[in-house]
Amino acid sequence: MSWTRCTTVLTTVLAVGTVLGGPASAVARPHSATPVTCTTPTPQPIHIRDFNGDGKSEFGVFRPSTGFWYINGVGTFHYGNAGDIPIADDYTGDGRVDLAVFRPSTGTWYINGVGAIHWGQAGDIPMPGDYAGTGKAVPAVFRPSNGTWYIRGYKNIVFGRCGDFPVPYGTGTPSHAVPAVFRPANGTWYISGVATLVYGVSGDTPIPHNYLGTGQQLAVFRPSTSTWYIYGGGSIQFGVAGDIPAPGSWGGGNHLAVFRPSTGMWLIRNGLSKVLGGNGDVPI
Ligand SMILES: [Ca+2]
């Protein structure tokens, strides 16, 4: 888990509407000129990880230094530039995840098979998801400076604040995303229109996923002990210090896996492992 400094001043906030090109309501109107200063965590990417549509996840990494994707059994692709953020999701609704990146410097989304879409700006955290319930993911960003979710083709939703982990939370089947945040300060999940629940502590990484096969469960990964806490599913120690949790549908009911950057090793809890990627790579 890494942390980025979020410092926003009035002028930046006022530029929101212009940059987004959205409806007038997208223009943030701060209450005062007081600078907003906070520390916003970089969230663990929440990916479906199924690139070939077989219902199972693939091991895969994105290399931010080069813009290359390495996906086990699918291929190697150059899609994106250095500094881009991988945001693979199913944007076309065909059940397969599409390569995609968000370019913070310009607020542009590049979606394979769809094209380039300007949505968001530097400092925003991309949070694609199927918020409108159309069966397709749409570009969306969470803006820590004003706690607003800008969801393309849908609406803007003020939910959360700077310092929160934004976490698109899936409800129903197929997954219909709603804005949600995990607040490290009080270990509380706030799920728009669904619930507010204390689960986890400061320092945990939120990793909601369908662990139990009954829909998405709240879950956190505690790096200090490499322990997974799954709401309704207990706690499981799996991984070692430095591992990145990579929940997925790995077959045979296995949902826990970790990516070990130091060795490029992927390990599934059932004992399967594979080397794919290395230091600096982002598991996707
Ligand atoms: Ca697959």
Image (cartoon, grey):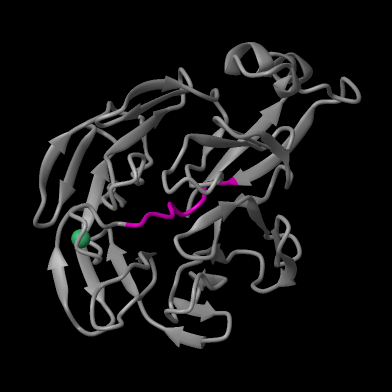
Q: Which secondary structure type mostly characterizes the magenta part of the structure? A: loop
Inspect the magenta stretch and tell me whether residue 234 lies in it: no
Quadrant housing residue 113: top left
In the displayed image of the protein, which residue is found farthest to the right? Answer: 32
Q: Splitting the image into four quadrants, where does ligand 1 fall?
A: bottom left
Choose between 217 and 201: the one closer to the eye: 217
Q: Is residue 269 visible?
A: yes
Q: Which residues are magenta?
A: 41-48
Measured as percent of width and height from the top left, residue 237 is found at 43, 84
- Above-or-below relation of 255 to 55: below
Looking at the image, residue 17 sits to the left or right of residue 282; the answer is right
The answer to whether residue 45 is magenta is: yes
> Which residue shows up at 33% across the image and 44% down it?
88
Going by the picture, which residue comes out furthest to the front? Answer: 134
Q: Residue furthest top?
A: 18
Residue 173 horizontal/vertical position (percent)? 47, 65
Residue 4 to residue 82: above or below: below
Q: Nearer the viewer, residue 277 or 247?
A: 247
Residue 133, given in percent of the width and then of the height, sits at: 52, 49
In this orientation, does residue 263 appear? no
Residue 47 quadrant: bottom left
Residue 83: x %, y % from top left: 35, 29
**178 or 183, which is in the foreground?**
178
- Residue under the point 36% across and 31% down: 84
Left-right relation of 82 to 25: left
Left or right placement of residue 163 versus residue 169 in this view? right
For image coordinates 16% across by 47% down, the residue present is 70
Q: Nearer the viewer, residue 24 or 11?
A: 24
Residue at horizontal 54%, vertical 70%? 220
